[in-house]
Every structure is written in C-alpha cells, then in structure tokens.
Amino acid sequence: MPDKLEWIPILTELGEDIVARIIEKSPDAKSALLKAKADFEAAEKEAGDLRRKGHENEG
Amino acid sequence: MKLTKRSTTFRAVALPLLILALLTGTLPAPACNKDETKKSLAVASEAAKDIAGGTRDTIKAVGQAFDKKLITLEQKDKLADLLIAISKGGQKGVAAISALEASGVTELDLNQASALNALFDTEVITPFLDLISELAKLSPSQSAAIRAALSGVRVAILLLSQKIGRNDVEQIILKREEAYA
C-alpha cells in the first residue's frame, strides 16, 4: 500500500481547488445556478467515467 | 416638443437600459419579504454550486485513490454509484431552485416545501449518508483525500439545508458519522 505521504500533493491540489471555489462567489443566484447545473452535469459524466474505470476489458 | 441634445442622449441610452433591466429583472426590488427570499435563493444557489464542485472534487479523489490502489475495484464502484446518484439528484435540485427563482416565488406553500424536502432527502441526503457509511469501511490512510473532498460537500449541504428550513439534517449527518466513528 502506498505511503500516507503520497496523499500530500493530492491534498494540496484539492485544498487549492476548495479555496478557489470559496473565494469565487457568484454575482447572483442565476449565475450560481448556471454554474451548479454545469458542474452537476460534468460530475455525472465524470462519475460515469469513474464507474467504468477498471471494467474496460469486460465483455 | 423640442428635444435637447441631453434628453435625446438620455432616451438613446437610458431607455434601452431600462427595458433591458425590466426584462431581466435586474432592477432593485422594493424592500419586502421578496428581498429576503431572493437572498435565501442566492445563498441556496451558491450552496448548490458548492455541492456540485465538491462532488467533482470527491470523484477526482476517488479516482486517484483507485489509481494508487488504495481502494479496490468494488469499493471504487460503490463510491462511483453513489456519486452518480448525487450528481443526478443535484441536477434535479438545481432545476427545482431554478423554477422557484424564475417564477418569483416569495414564500413556499406546503406542497412546494414538501416536494423540495422530499427531493432533497431522497436525491441528495440519502446518497450522501451512504457515502459516509462506505467511507467508514476504509482506513484513514485509504480515504484521506476522499474525506477532505467530501467535507466541502458536507458544509454546503448543511448551508443549503438551513436555507430550506431543514435544521434536522445536521443531526441526521452527525448521527450517521457517530455510528461509524
């Protein structure tokens, strides 16, 4: 199993993403909803890709 | 009527702006309950955006944990299924908030509140609680980044739940976390 230290760069990158999102506030509800819609749609696609990962060679 | 250069300029510039503002609803609303609701909807929208972003962070963290062989294929699949459920549920939630925002709802009636709560419970809270349960089966070293990413989703869910009058959600989440502590 990889060492715990391997998480450090991942956590650093993740922390940067979270902080960027906290700082970046939407100007209004409409903009926030548009961004939420786009992100949820992207999340569904990415989660689908994640689900298929490792099953590529299955019949 | 004789038009001065100034009034002509005013009509040329201000009138289209006024029409645009009326069409897009960007004029300041009178101080009333509608303002509060707009503010609440803005906070709810921001929280929805943060749940969406946090969900994407969690998906990325699960993928990285799988790539590093920290979690098995079966564990990854279970987490991915729950993340798909949250992503689909989030889209339904955004559609519901958008509909409220578009129709200028100032106060939710009983049916609207009940429908919104049912949607929130089944489409967002349930898969989120199941994610907590699944992560509890992993060791801290297996799940460090996934837990960190999910904490962003947790904060945003609590914020959104407060805005739709669901202060009980925090207790439900805490109960689930304590059960697996």
Image (tube, rainbow, N blue to C red):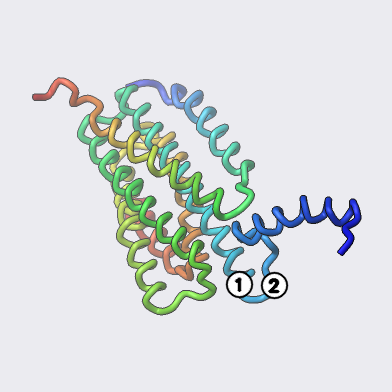
Residue B137 lies in what quarter of the image?
Answer: top left
Q: Is residue A53 above or below residue A30?
A: above
If the image is split into quadrants, where does the N terminus of chain B sit?
A: bottom right
Residue closest to the eye, B37 or B85: B37
- The residue indicated by pointer 2 is B30
- The residue indicated by pointer 1 is B34
Q: Is residue B46 left or right of residue B175?
A: right
The reply to whether discs 2 and 1 touch (Cβ–Cβ < 8 Å) is yes
Give, as a three-letter code, the residue at label 2. Pro
Residue closest to the eye, B23 or B111: B23
Label 2 sits on a secondary structure element that is loop
Residue placed furthest toward the bottom: B110
Q: CA distance from mark 2 to mark 1?
A: 8 Å
Q: Position of residue B52 (x, y in %)?
A: 44, 45
Q: Is residue A37 above or below residue B115?
A: above
Q: Pointer 1 indicates a residue of which chain?
A: B
Q: Position of residue B70 (x, y in %)?
A: 32, 27
What residue is shown at x 40% (from left), y 32% (from top)? B61
